[in-house]
Amino acid sequence: MFLADLITPARIRLPVEAQDKPGALRELAHLLAEQCGGGVEDIVQGVEERERSLGTGIGFGVAIPHGKSPTMRELGAVCGVTAVPIPWDSVDGEPVRLLFLLAGPESSAGTHVKVLSRIARLVRREAVRQRLLQATSPEELHRAIRESETW
């Protein structure tokens, strides 16, 4: 599975309007529920529960909030770039602008881990992060993900 197959242009929010962590989580949870099904409150609750146990700010201005959502039939993912950096409790102490939100049922745990790993590998490359952050449309960001996966 490629990220570009999971994160289509319709699943990209550019820009994320929220200017704080709770608002960004909620905004992306709405997008995920619209595109993939599931309940917004259930998605937010699952992601916030995960955030309380271990933060998802992986550094370099990137966060990958994720959690379990029993109202979803399969794993779903969305991506967003914030208009302004958002404080996130990241491992490097830096705010984030690039967000990937994942949620799915307990039965998708294996795929969930694989997708998390693919995202982490993708964004650890500075050139890729910059290209994603500089995208001006969902289609451009999607193209950057797709082309970066073939490197």
Image (cartoon, rainbow, N blue to C red):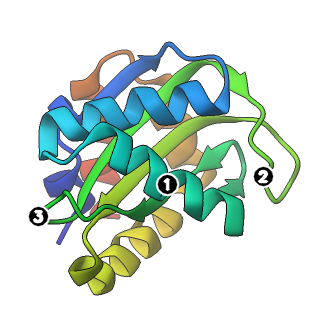
Q: Nearer the viewer, mark 3 or mark 2?
A: 3
* Image height of 15 relative to 139, above or below: above
Left/right placement of residue 24 relative to residue 27 reads right
User: Which of the pair 104/93 is nearer the observer?
Assistant: 104
Q: Amino acid at mark 1?
A: Val
Q: Which mark is residue 90?
A: 2
Q: Position of residue 32 (x, y in %)?
A: 26, 40
Q: Amino acid at mark 3?
A: Arg
Give the secondary structure at mark 1: helix
Residue placed under numbered mark 1 in the picture = 47
Q: Is residue 75 visible?
A: yes
Q: Residue at x 31, y 38 (%)?
A: 40
Q: Position of residue 93 (x, y in %)?
A: 88, 48
Q: Is residue 65 visible?
A: no
Nearer the N terminus, badge 3 or badge 2? 3
Q: Nearer the viewer, mark 1 or mark 2?
A: 1
Give the secondary structure at mark 3: loop
Residue placed under numbered mark 3 in the picture = 73
Left/right placement of residue 125 relative to residue 20 reads left
* Image height of 99 relative to 31, above or below: below
User: Which of the pair 122/24 is nearer the observer?
Assistant: 24
Identify the image quadrant of the C terminus: bottom left
Q: Amino acid at mark 2?
A: Ser
User: Which of the pair 105/133 is nearer the observer?
Assistant: 105
User: Which of the pair 56/150 is nearer the observer?
Assistant: 56
